[in-house]
Image: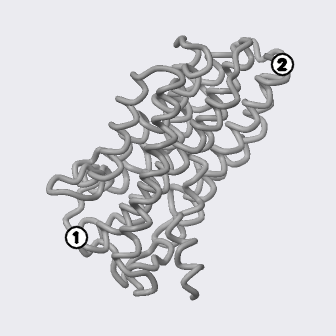
Amino acid sequence: MSNLHAWFLALRPKTLPASVAPILLGSALAFSEGYFNTTAFCLALICAFFLQLAVNFANDLFDAQKGVDTKKRLGPLRGLHLGLIQSDQLKKGLWLVLGIALVSGFLLAAMVSWWLLVFGLASLIVALVYSGGPYPLASYALGELLVLVFFGWLAVMGSYFIHTHNLTLESFVYATLVGLLSAAIMLVNNLRDCYTDATAGKKTLVVYLGERKSRALYRLLLLAAPLLHWSQNPRMDDWAWLPLLLIAPLLFLLFRRIGHLEGKELNRMLALTSLTLLIYSLSQSLLLLLVG
């Protein structure tokens, strides 16, 4: 494995839709109501993307330091614990992506509202203390909740707000839908790593609930997506059924397979859950742009 490939793995490309999808959906919703600021959209996209990279880098760094990532790891290989990336290099990468996120967030706050800076700083802090510090949030079963808050509510409603300077119930429902699918990505990731996490003392939600209840929760998170979408479009007119039609095969496949897949097999589940989020967000965003 080359050093460049090791850095590519550190980006965790399968998780990146969780940062891009909510910005697209929130902005498309604003566009459908006659509001759109191109500069604000670009800054929000940059800020969210690099915050996601910061979370990924910090998770790799702190998990390796605490012995969570070992040779028994079932997830994708990580360059740090394989020795292909040094901890000092990853720290520099972490500070670089945090810096880009901070600058873009500051410019966005200066353009729209300084209140955004408060939420941006909260996001930066969570990115650092999620896996690190004396009380890492990931060890207190907070991962899925934090994903709902920051990659659902804050990202979708925040991206809607930067265009409209307003918040609506519709933006909250879409934010919840995206947040719950993002939480499903986190949940299946923690399900795969439950044994190594428990051994290292990392008490994720899966470690607390156990595998059976965690798999049931995953199914509930999947079911929430079509139910929330239907709540916004009960008559299913104006092509409103299209996003559900596109993700229905994936939802069916994921709903069935979560009951029996184990270990490394869950890597495929993680990728497909992320793909479900991306397909829904892209198709619903396109629908909002074309139909309103």
Of 136 and 259, the residue lying toward us: 136
- Judged left or right of residue 95, residue 244 is right
When asked about the image quadrant of residue 44, the answer is top right
Q: How far across and down, in percent of the image, does residue 17 sit? A: 61, 49
- Taking 184 as reference, is 38 above or below it? above
Disc 1 marks which amino acid?
Ala
Alpha-carbon span between mark 2 and mark 1: 50 Å
Q: Secondary structure at mark 1?
A: loop
Could you tell me the amino acid type at mark 2? Answer: Val
- CA neighbours of label 2 inside 10 A, class few (<14), some (14 to 19), many (20+): few
- Residue 291 tag number: 2
Res 105 visible: yes
Report whether residue 221 is seen. no
What percent of the width, then of the height, locates residue 227? 59, 25
- Residue wearing tag 1: 200
| Front in this rendered view, residue 237 or 71 | 71
Determine the residue positioned at 46% across, 48% down. Answer: 51
x then y, percent, for residue 240:
78, 22
Picture layout, residue 231 above or below residue 181: above
Residue name at image x 39 percent, y 30 percent: 117
